[in-house]
Image (cartoon, coloured by chain):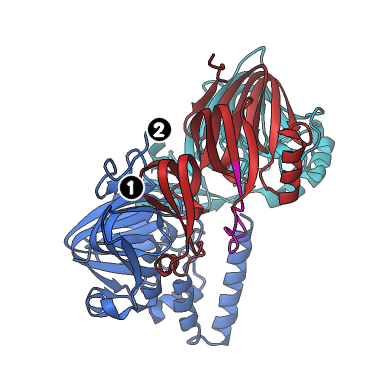
Chain colours: A blue, B cyan, C red
């Protein structure tokens, strides 16, 4: 195979023939998730490339305006400098997307990087982030992303995100938790099934799906759920315990 | 062929009255229209008594999709291969690797053991030599899972194709699969047990092998 | 005289096919998924590998990837963990490979194991590099997608995540860089606290997924 180098690498595109690796041409600043970079070429005669955590004072003013997701701050860095960055994410497909004065919510673990022109906020749906404005972002998915339109019901693990349409009927509030504890799995959306509950989308917009995967180890999701446990009474707690035990044993089989 | 390959890891299928689909629980990714999912008892046909009970733990919960709509299936980010059943003969697939099929196909659980019969199966199950497979008869389409995708190797009369059981996904046609021990294998270092126990395929058909020894 | 190269073929991108006509090929343990004809598989232990010294080294280092010797008449299909396969031709030069990313080697190639130094102290992985020399074909593995070949030249030095490194070929100088900046990049994930920097002339192969 013909080796690539800064003269032949794409400026902001997938590596040719490779859905799983993406090359970013860094000219200034880029917000990116940690642990996703596999190699980089610093620009010749350039200042090199630096990676700063978001908590650094030198970027705080700018960062605070663009990044309002404190729970995830530790997962993000700002890359500064000139050169080519090659990104890879756990063998997932990586694609770039353009948001045009839009609003898109996607799974935090799947967002790789985004233009500083976009605003990032934490979504009320646990484990998700919302991007607002106009700009480009990079997201990863298990298999290529499938675009679908509501009305549609989606397995939570298959959901990557959604744009423009209302959040699915599955909110992170007392109502969600009681439905979860009610044990009426799948009954809450009027679907008689043993399948796990789904997210129900209606309205005008786009839903982004991927092929289902093993439960993501999102430590922040665990924290958020843990925070809600304090609101439960004893029957609620012991029911939750048996639901978790069941899930653990089915996960361990695989 | 009602199942459509959306991408390497996702298939979609229309569901209508008389055109129900059976799929492994957890495989449904999304659906449009009015579709209901109900559990069905996995058929244990062909084996009874003790062997049948031992196999209970091996069975995969299947769900029938019925109504009017379209369902997207995928499973843990694994690759999906669509296989036509009936043209060349029945489909035999490693039980864990069947993800969905037309409800019209008849499914039976068959144990591929080193010796035939119930006794052999029981002994085989105890010793770990052998595997549970689902056999699909009739005419229709099935979808199988693999780690990384499958390659299709022809099984031709007069030639034996030997397959690592851990890489075996399915075979279709008039194919006979026998479990054999490779007596020439010594110094089995590490986890390379695939070289010691082998599946010998003879007959006329196709065997699907995955590019990995990982279980599902 | 150019030695005859063994026929290494790819079936799709994850399966290596090798035809044997009474000769042999070495492959990673457990990598055989199917074969036609008559093929025998033996552990490349004492005497089967590259001499006693190399074999002892492998035992002493507890290298997780040991090679097996496949010989006979037929076609053998090799694969490992559904990883993509990369074929690299050697014409008397040297290839340094992350030992666990090696799938198969044609018969005439020689191998040696080198201790890579401080690497892998945090992850316990990647302590060993297999150096391959001679004439033939090496089949390497890439995890998470197709491998990427990156050229290194004096004008373009390259920095690589060690967990994404597969192999390197050429006249390269490899250094470990332990800078604060890289550590910021690792963040909460369990990556290596250092990066690999390559200067000189050559090619580095990387994979999209970190080990």
Vertical arrangement, residue B139 with respect to residue B216, above or below: above
Q: Please provide the residue range marked out in magenta.
A: C117-130
Residue A2 in the image: state x and y as whole percent. 37, 33
- In the image, is B104 to the left or to the right of A85? right
Q: Secondary structure at mark 2?
A: loop
In terms of secondary structure, what is the magenta stretch mainly? loop
Can you tell which of label 2 and label 1 is closer to the viewer? 1
In magenta segment, residue C123? yes
> Disc 2 vs disc 1: Cβ atoms closer than 8 Å?
no
Pointers 2 and 1 within a single chain: no
Up/down of C53 relative to A161, above or below? above
Residue lying at 58% horizontally and 87% vertically, measured from the top left: A234
Residue tagged by mark 2? Answer: A1
Q: Residues within 10 Å of mark 1 (few under 14, many from 20)?
A: some
Q: In the structure shown, which secondary structural element does the residue marked by tag 1 occupy?
A: loop
**Residue with the mark numbered 1:** C156
Let me know if residue B138 appears in the view: no
Relative to the observer, which residue lies in front, C26 or C11?
C26
């Amino acid at each position: 195979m013909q080796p690539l180098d800064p003269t032949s690498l794409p400026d902001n595109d997938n590596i040719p023939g490779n859905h799983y690796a993406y090359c970013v041409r860094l000219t200034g600043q880029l917000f990116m998730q940690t642990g996703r970079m596999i190699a980089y070429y610093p620009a010749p005669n350039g200042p090199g490339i630096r990676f700063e955590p978001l908590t650094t004072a030198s970027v705080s003013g700018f960062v605070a305006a663009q990044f309002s997701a404190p729970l995830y701050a530790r997962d993000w860095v700002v890359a500064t400098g000139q050169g080519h960055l090659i990104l890879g994410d756990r063998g997932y497909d990586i694609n770039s997307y353009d948001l045009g004065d839009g609003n898109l919510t996607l799974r935090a673990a799947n967002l790789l990087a985004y233009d500083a022109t976009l605003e990032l906020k934490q979504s009320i749906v646990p484990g998700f982030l919302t991007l607002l404005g106009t700009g480009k972002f990079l997201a990863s998915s298990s298999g290529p992303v499938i675009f679908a339109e509501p009305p549609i019901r989606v397995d939570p693990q298959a959901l990557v995100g959604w744009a423009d349409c209302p959040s699915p009927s599955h909110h992170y509030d007392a109502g969600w938790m009681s439905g979860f504890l009610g044990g009426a799995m799948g009954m809450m959306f009027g679907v008689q099934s043993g399948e796990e509950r789904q997210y129900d989308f209606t309205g005008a917009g786009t839903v982004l799906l991927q092929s289902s995967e093993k439960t993501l180890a999102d430590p922040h999701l665990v924290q958020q759920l843990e925070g809600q446990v304090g609101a439960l009474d004893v029957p609620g707690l012991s029911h939750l315990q048996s639901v978790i035990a069941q899930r653990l044993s089915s996960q361990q089989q695989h | 062929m009602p199942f459509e390959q959306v991408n390497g890891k996702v298939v979609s299928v229309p569901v209508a009255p008389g055109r129900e689909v059976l799929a492994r629980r957890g495989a449904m990714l999304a659906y449009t229209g009015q579709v209901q999912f109900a559990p069905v008892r996995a058929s244990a046909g062909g084996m009874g008594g003790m062997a049948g009970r031992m196999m209970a733990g091996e069975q995969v919960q299947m769900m029938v999709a019925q109504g009017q709509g379209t369902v997207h299936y995928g499973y843990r980010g694994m690759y999906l291969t669509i296989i036509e059943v009936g043209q060349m003969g029945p489909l035999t697939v490693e039980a864990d690797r069947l993800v969905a099929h037309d409800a019209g196909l008849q499914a039976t659980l068959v144990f591929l053991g080193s010796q035939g019969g119930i006794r052999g199966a029981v002994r085989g199950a105890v010793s770990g030599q052998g595997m549970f497979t689902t056999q699909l008869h009739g005419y229709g389409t099935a979808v199988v899972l693999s780690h990384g995708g499958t390659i299709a190797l022809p099984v031709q009369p007069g030639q034996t194709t030997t397959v690592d059981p851990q890489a075996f996904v399915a075979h279709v046609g008039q194919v006979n699969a026998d479990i054999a021990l490779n007596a020439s294998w010594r110094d089995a270092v590490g986890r390379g047990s695939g070289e010691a126990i082998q599946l010998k395929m003879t007959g006329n058909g196709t065997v699907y092998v995955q590019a990995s020894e990982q279980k599902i | 005289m150019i030695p005859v190269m063994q026929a290494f073929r790819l079936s799709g991108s994850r399966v290596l096919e090798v035809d044997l006509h009474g000769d042999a090929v070495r492959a990673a343990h457990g990598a055989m998924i199917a074969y036609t004809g008559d093929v025998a598989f033996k552990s490349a232990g004492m005497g089967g590998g590259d001499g006693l010294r190399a074999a002892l080294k492998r035992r002493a280092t507890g290298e997780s990837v040991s090679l097996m010797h496949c010989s006979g008449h037929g076609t053998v299909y090799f694969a490992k963990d559904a990883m993509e396969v990369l074929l690299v031709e050697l014409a008397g030069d040297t290839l340094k490979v992350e030992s666990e990313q090696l799938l198969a080697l044609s018969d005439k190639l020689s191998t040696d194991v080198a201790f890579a130094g401080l690497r892998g102290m945090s992850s316990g992985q990647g302590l060993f590099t297999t150096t391959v020399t001679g004439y033939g074909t090496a089949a390497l593995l890439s995890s998470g997608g197709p491998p990427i070949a990156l050229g290194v030249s004096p004008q373009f030095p390259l920095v690589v995540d060690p967990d994404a490194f597969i192999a390197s070929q050429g006249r390269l100088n490899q250094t470990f860089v332990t800078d604060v900046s890289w550590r910021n990049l690792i963040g909460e994930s369990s990556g290596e606290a250092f990066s690999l920097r390559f200067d000189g002339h050559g090619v580095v192969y990387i994979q999209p997924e970190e080990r």
